[in-house]
Amino acid sequence: MEEIYLVLIFLFVLFLLLGTGVWVGLALFGVAYLGLEMFTSRPAGDAMLTRIWTGSSSWTLTALPLFIWMGEILFRSRLSQDMFRGLSPWMQRLPGGLVHVNIVGCTIFAAVSGSSAATLTTVGKMSIPELRKRGYPEYMTIGTLTGAATLGLMIPPSLTLIVYGVAVEQSISKLFMAGILPGIVLAGMFMAYVAGWSFLRPSEVPKIANRMSFSEKLRESRFLIPIILLILVVIGSMYGGWATATEAASIGVIGAFILAAAQGSLNRKTFIDSLLGATKTSAMIALILMGATALTLAMGFTGLPRALAEFIESLQLSQFSLLMALMLFYIVLGMFLDGISSVVLTMAIVQEMVIGAGIDLIWFGIFIVIVVEMAQITPPIGFNLFVMQGITNHEMGYIAKTAIPLFLIMVLMVFVMIFVPELATFLPDNMRGPRG
């Protein structure tokens, strides 16, 4: 019973701070300090400083700002203009036509950005004007883009997977590999939804204006080849064991600079803007991680994670029941917190439950990402909804309604993952370890 009171106190203080507009990272620090002062005899300042420095100096975390920088460089290049031009000739013949550009474009950009917001902004600025010009229904354009942009959280390099890997001390490279097949399958399910829409409502699908020969399609796609090669090099270097996640991130940054220079979009302003953008995002995530580290320490001293894990174990829940409970828990939590905050805030407790239930932590990382993806498109704090509102000026409720089918597809994907766990474990189990 004492543990329940502790949980309620922690949650009350946390949401009180968040409700007053305090940054997430600082709110976590506040709860941690309160917990150490009230429930332990350990000096709060010394304990927090030591633990934060130990966690923040992890070499694995170096991959985070590097991957963010890679995405920022490409975000400011001419990739967005070139992507629609390169994809549209191949997509227009598919059932559903150019709506597929939203999904494929998000899948490709997700593989270089690692951020759902950056993916949504880049592909949205590219595709929304073009699809409107060609007469595609607004609800399909907005809904598929809002949902598909969440692939930025799963397909490597995923910032959420980096944070999760650091939190549970798992290989970032293995987590990246684990996200590839589920990401591709989820993108395929989104495309199947678009195809189903075109068959059910053929009158809403605009006619193809002009047909292109195979050689013309290849000519239009020449701008996509460099970015696809960059993706293959970054991911392939990790899978082949030639590079760690941090080394692959360095390769990605260099490749992004080369690509931007070749496109003619690399200049002093682009360089400074990309550096400042990466610094701001990295600092924000670092503050959240440090706050979560302090909170984890405070909860560890109180014995709360172990007590809650033992309580869950005493309920004798099956793996399936536990996963369903966690899915609902993260969906509700995601209505109020962003994905990274949700992961770092809860992992100290949830990790014990997962290990006790015999669930593979690599597989669970992908499960968490899918559920966090759902939270990105659920009101009132679904981050993708805010980004889309900024791009289109649509009402939040309208955007959320258009994304409901994509949300339901993600729920279906959770069950696919549960019944076919090899989707997430096959590539990590068969990759080579880093050399040297």
Image (tube, helix red, strand yellow):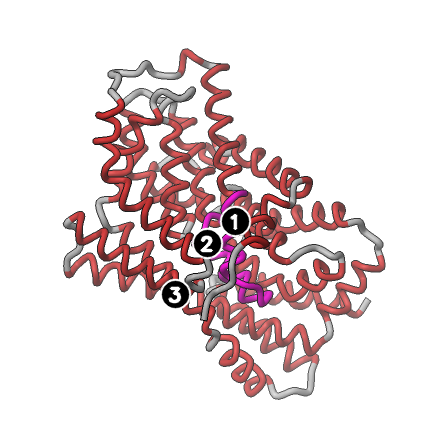
Q: Which mark is residue 167?
A: none
Q: Is residue 316 left or right of residue 15?
A: right
Given residues 162 and 197, the one toward you in this image is: 162
Element type at mark 3: helix
What distance separates the C-alpha of mark 1 from that of mark 3? 19 Å
Q: Is residue 243 visible?
A: yes
Q: Which residue position holds label 2?
A: 158
Residue indicated by mark 1: 179
* Contact? badges 1 and 2 (CB < 8 Å): yes
Cα separation, mark 2 vs mark 3, equals: 15 Å
Q: Earlier in the sequence, mark 2 or mark 3?
A: 2
Residue 319: x percent and y percent?
75, 49
For mark 1, does the 10 Å Cα neighbourhood hold few (<14), some (14 to 19), or many (20 or more) residues? many
Q: Image point 84% across, 55% down: which residue?
A: 315
Left of 8 or right of it: where is 433? left
Circle 3 sits on which residue?
247
State the image coordinates of residue 269 (x, y, percent, origin top left): 17, 59
Type of amino acid under label 3: Glu
The quadrant the N terminus occupies is bottom right
Image quadrant assignment for residue 243:
bottom left
Q: Which residues are magenta?
A: 154-182
Q: Identify the amino acid type marked 1.
A: Gly
Is residue 169 highlighted in magenta? yes
Taking the magenta stretch, the answer to whether it contains residue 34 is: no
**Is most of the magenta stretch helix, strand or loop?**
helix
